[in-house]
Amino acid sequence: MPTVLFGISGSIAAFKALEVMRLLMADGVDIVPILSPGGAKFVTRATVEALTGKRAVTEIFPEPSQQEIEHIALAQKADLLVTCPASADIIAKYATGICDDALSLVALAFGKPHLIAPAMNHRMWEHPATVANVDLLKTRGISFIGPDRGAMACDEEGWGRLAQIEEIHGSIMAELGKNGPLAGKKIVVSAGATKEFIDDVRFISNRSSGRMGHALAAAARDMGASVILVTASDLSPTPAVNAIKVASAHEMHDVIFREAATADAVIMSAAVADFAPASQVSGKIKKQGDDVPMQIELARTPDILSELGKDKRRDLVLVGFAAEFGPEGKNEAVRKCREKSCDLICLNDVSREDIGFGTDENEIVLVYPDDSEKKIRKCSKKESARIIMKHIAGMFSASGKKDEKDKAEEEWPD
């Protein structure tokens, strides 16, 4: 379990830090809260202690005195220091080495890796002193998340607003996982339902939300991979992931093949349309009358997974998804796995309303070319994505790809 020293300084955005900590704890991160005197004015010690279950560090010389020197002990035990939100004052202390409170003292002892999420009035953020302090800290290897531009508590607008909670959380998870089992690997993930346009207004699509693909991208990120997410989904971007937005099957085909050339693994979780209008009409097609039917000629779209499998490199891990109806889906998944030269097919039963398209949960069966299978119990898409990525990581060795399916299954969670 990784340990994060989570510093909260004096900014009205301090209440948002509680949600970031909650998300981190849900991901299994151990949080040690540290409050500056200003931070303690906005969120109380009792609040952060109740949330984290840990004593909040607020004093340079805590009472009763401890045998170990606390700020040194914390620096030795933690994996990452986060300051969220970071005021102009605390950034100035970090830059100059002033340590007159618990947070600045711990930061000086810890050094890096250190992620800072600033939050302050735009005049303070743009002040030459703050600009110089931020530039200096960046040269020392400290990373900044945000700030964003937007409305502020003082009824003004500008740069200085705390970055989105999801972006901060994602950046922290990426930093914690940078030396994980997929470190140095490039993973390409596709997500969402492609849109095949009839005219400039209407399109053919399907029910896929893209949640599974986005969860897979986040899981790969958290295990140290460099992730390319090729997405046709309308979901918000996955933080700390290189997302490439596409619409149609043809667009996805072109991007996937470009990125696959240098990828270690390609995971085709997108629901790519099998058919598209043979031609797209410019503008909007007008109705010809209530009794006049409309006919659309359809043409096959590229089978991206099949094309990837035709000339697949020996060191490329190729994973497909099969959305099938009912218990007969296993046979179809095996066929796809063999014919498309996949290392693995993730089968999900989209006939059920409680899993699959548009839901937060999934129940996946991993199907292999030899007809063997492994079932992932019904769980959140986030959790199932982590299990799948853990298994994919087991297919790699220092020299490239290897088959460790049996080993992976021995370590499979219940």
Image (cartoon, rainbow, N blue to C red):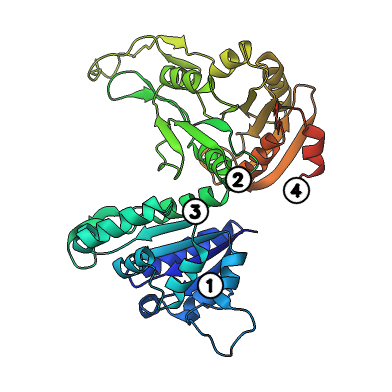
Separation of marks 1 and 2 at Cα, in angstroms: 28 Å
| Image location (x, y in percent) of residue 44 | 43, 80
Q: Is residue 375 left or right of residue 220?
A: right
Work out whether 291 lies above or below 177: above
Mark 1 or mark 3, which is nearer the start of the sequence? 1
Q: Which residue is mark 2?
A: 179
3 or 1: mark nearer the eye: 3
At x 57% / y 13%, what residue is drawn? 307
Of mark 4 and mark 1, the one earlier in the sequence is 1
Depth order, front residue of 131/353 = 131
User: Could you say which disc has been placed on residue 413 in the image?
Assistant: 4
Say what secondary structure mark 3 lies in: helix
Classify residue 31 by image quadrant: bottom right
Quadrant for residue 352, please give it. top right
4 vs 3, front mark = 3
- Residue 192 appears in view: no
**Residue type at the position of mark 2:** Asn
- CA neighbours of label 2 inside 10 A, class few (<14), some (14 to 19), many (20+): some
Q: Nearer the viewer, residue 72 or 9?
A: 72
Three-letter residue code for mark 3: Ile
- Sequence-wise first label, 4 or 2: 2
Q: Amino acid at mark 4?
A: Pro
Q: Nearer the viewer, residue 116 or 159?
A: 116
Q: Which residue is labeled 1 in the image?
A: 51
Residue 347: image location, x then y, percent: 66, 31
Report crowding for label 1: few under 14, some 14 to 19, many 20 or more residues within 10 A (C-alpha): some
Mark 4 or 3 closer to N-term? Answer: 3
